[in-house]
Image: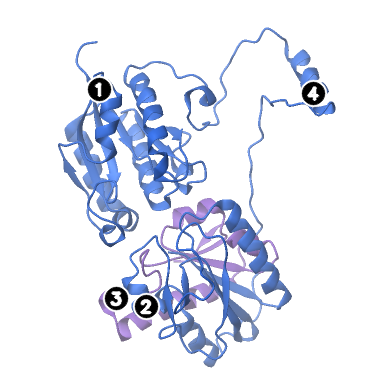
Chain colours: A blue, B purple
Amino acid sequence: MSNPFKVLYYVNQFFGQVGGEEKAGIEPFYKEEKIGPAAGFEALLEGEGTVIGTLVCGDNYFNEHNKEAFAFIMDTIKAAKPDLVVTGPAFNAGRYGMACGEIAAKVTEELGIPTLTGMYAENPGLDTCVSKVIVVSTPDSAAGMRTALPTMAKIARKLAKGEELGAPEEEGYIPQGRRLTVFSDKRGSKRAVEMLLARLNNQAFETELPMPQFDRVDPALAIKDLSKATIALVTSGGIVPFGNPDRIQSASAQKWGKYDISAAAALKGGYFTIHGGYDPVYANETPDRVAPLDVMKTLEKEGVIGKVYDYFYTTTGTGTSVGNALTFGKEIGAELKAAGVDGVILTST
Amino acid sequence: MVKEIERYGIPIVHMSTITTISQAVGANRIVPTIAIPHPVGNPSIAGPGEEALRRDLVERAVKSLGTPVEDITIFD
């Protein structure tokens, strides 16, 4: 092969070695260096490609100042003219996943440069890009870097050379919802009957056309008279009483808690955050900045709403599996329903 | 969590900063908020300004619960 292909890499403040949550607000910058996973990634290209530089941006900055972040990122990429842009892998980090997904999708759509990222299948960023970009399927935490990077490097080499990729399961990327024509030595009716027989015999079979999962819930009816309504406050922002009496996890929550706030005028003074996914300074100063009990109590006093429900429900959203979140929602919802709560305000960080 | 609670027929509003995530998971009533570490606050205007801001956001959330919607609706 002639010249090695040029890769531009994108990482967040953490993988960019700037810092943790306290640095999540940093503006994007670009260095003609291999920062964080970019170095290991280049080594895995075995000389076929080279990382020409790394873009770094804080997760909060990207999501809160999307336009400004994109302006810088797109200008940098246009100027650097890479052959391939790699973002992440983001594992199950939601904000990072949004950045990796949105950047990869926009670069390939607007600049026509192939892009590649990596995520855990439950990352909310997946929806932003999976139909347009190859997303390598990774484990849910950065401990999976060792398995994610080689797969990404292998696919990167194919993308850069314009080689055709194999099926998602073979190559290790997340299915894009595309249908390709493949030739089979058995006609459809025979395959269908074989599947049916396997199913009737309780044997394993694999459908050729998995149905997409559309899980939408119809909006609940509006509250007719807010001044008579009981409203509950729920948060995934990890706000708990001082000392965290129920020991709710600071990430990948296994449980939720409920606390009697019937006599409180605000959360300030009795609560703090144990959430491991954002800078806690502001929430610890005034937890009502995350779960606005103070204003809800004022609205109750003024008669705008009938009542704030006596219990406040809380858990930590960061890294929490969709499965656990479903369970928490079911359990909390059952309690609220039984208590006759009319409406819910749920805040997320 | 939002979706599972709404499945009981209780109207629920999601107050979140990254509204694209909120839409992706299927919240029907969404109020966009200020920033990830302080969704309903802004320490740079701490004091009466911040209180007014929080009140505005929460009032919007409360109103959304009293507003009929048929699909994902952002109250901004």
Mark 4, residue position: A198
Q: Position of residue A225 (x, y in %)?
A: 64, 81
Q: Secondary structure at mark 2?
A: helix
Mark 1, residue position: A49
B70, above or below A180, in the image: below
Given residues A214 and A110, the one toward you in this image is A214
Q: Is residue B71 visible?
A: no
**Residue at (49% x, 56% y) in the render:** A252
* Mark 4 Cα shell of 10 Å, populated few (<14), some (14-19), many (≥20): some
Mark 2, residue position: B53
The chain letter under disc 3 is B
Q: Secondary structure at mark 3?
A: helix
The N terminus of chain A, quarter of image = top left
Q: Secondary structure at mark 1?
A: strand
The chain letter under disc 4 is A
Mark closest to the chain's N terminus, 4 or 1: 1
The image's mark for residue B43 is 3
Report if the CB atoms under discs 2 and 1 are less than 8 Å apart. Answer: no
In the rendered image, residues at marks 2 and 4 fall on the same chain: no
* Mark 2 Cα shell of 10 Å, populated few (<14), some (14-19), many (≥20): some
A309, above or below A80, in the image: below
Q: Which amino acid does the dot numbered 1 rest on? A: Gly
Q: CA distance from mark 2 to mark 1?
A: 50 Å
Which one is in front in this view, the residue at disc 2 or the one at disc 1?
Answer: 1
Given residues A117 and A150, the one toward you in this image is A150
Q: CA distance from mark 2 to mark 4?
A: 61 Å
